[in-house]
Amino acid sequence: MANSPFSLSGQVILLTGGAGLYGRGLSAQLAETGATLVLASRNVEALRVVAAEETAKGHTVHARELDQGDEASVLRLRDSILADFGRIDGLVNNAVSRPMKSTQGPLADWEASMRTNATGLFSITRTFGEAMASRGSGKIVNIGSIQGMVGPDFSLYEGTAMGAVADYFFHKGGMLNLTRYFAALYGPRGVRVNCVSPGGYYTGQNPLFVERYCKATYLRRMADDHDLGGPVIFLLSEAARYITGANLPVDGGYTAH
């Protein structure tokens, strides 16, 4: 597999948010590629558990602390990775903060969301993008959402305690064009920047929502931990060497209507 264009063997890959909704599945699948995987988030204890589980399988996984909303924390993470591994080959921007629980919530919740999900995204992408561009090689994959591609369908949530919150639509939509911006900026310096936009993940949601959502997809199901890693690994690999500035929906056909 080491000679396969899909292999990440020998590469140093940073995955932010490696223990949450998307992160745990991504951690497992990225670890299997042979890369040196660095997981980073505010909850470093949870990451250490993931790293220990993956290391026990023979994979190379490290846990580091990161507060994406704090530029000093981003810079410390960059410096520690470069000091310990000598390089950074790929960044997967998966970390997300969800302080806003309702569109009618305090404005401070919106501002906190933007600090991590907009300003923080820009900060970490710029910081590690420059580190990769200085070597003339690298890949960045942003984990977006179909909620950055289309407007909300509020009928999915009727009769449940669930809902669609405005900040997520805003920063995931912005992520798409920031992906294109950095692809244009760093492409001449050998760094590819792409986005994948997952659809709904099954986490035991209200059965009413699940039934409606599944009917809205061509594959008639929600996503699980096995669905996102393949597309991310593809975009990090040499198999995608001529792809940049792209967005790949991973949504069972939800946005293809």
Image (cartoon, grey):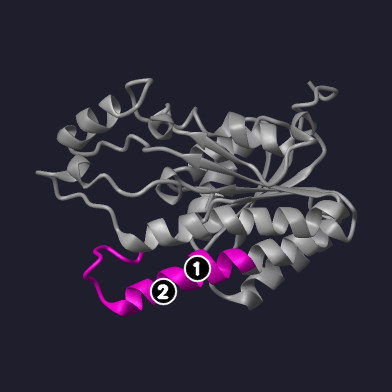
Say if residue 11 shows up in the picture: yes
Density class for disc 2 (Cα within 10 Å; few <14, some 14-19, many ≥20) is: some
Span of residues in magenta: 98-122
Residue 71 is tagged as none
Instruction: Establish if 165 lies above or below 146.
Output: below
The amino acid pointed to by label 1 is Thr
Q: Image point 58% across, 63% down: which residue?
A: 121
The C terminus appears in which quarter of the rendering?
A: top left
Residue hosting label 2: 112
Instruction: Tell me which secondary structure the magenta stretch mostly adopts.
Output: helix
Q: Residue at x 70, y 31 (%)?
A: 33
Measured as percent of width and height from the top left, residue 85 is found at 82, 54
Q: Amino acid at mark 2?
A: Ala
Q: How far apart are the two marked residues, 2 and 1, measured between alpha carbons?
A: 7 Å
What SS does tag 2 mark?
A: helix
Is label 1 in a helix, a strand or a loop? helix
Is there a contact, CB below 8 Å, between mark 2 and mark 1? yes
Taking the spot 86% from the left edge, 54% from the top edge, the residue there is 188
Front in this rendered view, residue 114 or 225: 114
User: Which quadrant of the view contains residue 28?
Assistant: top right
Q: Is residue 219 left or right of residue 93?
A: left
User: Is any atom of residue 59 visible in this view?
Assistant: no
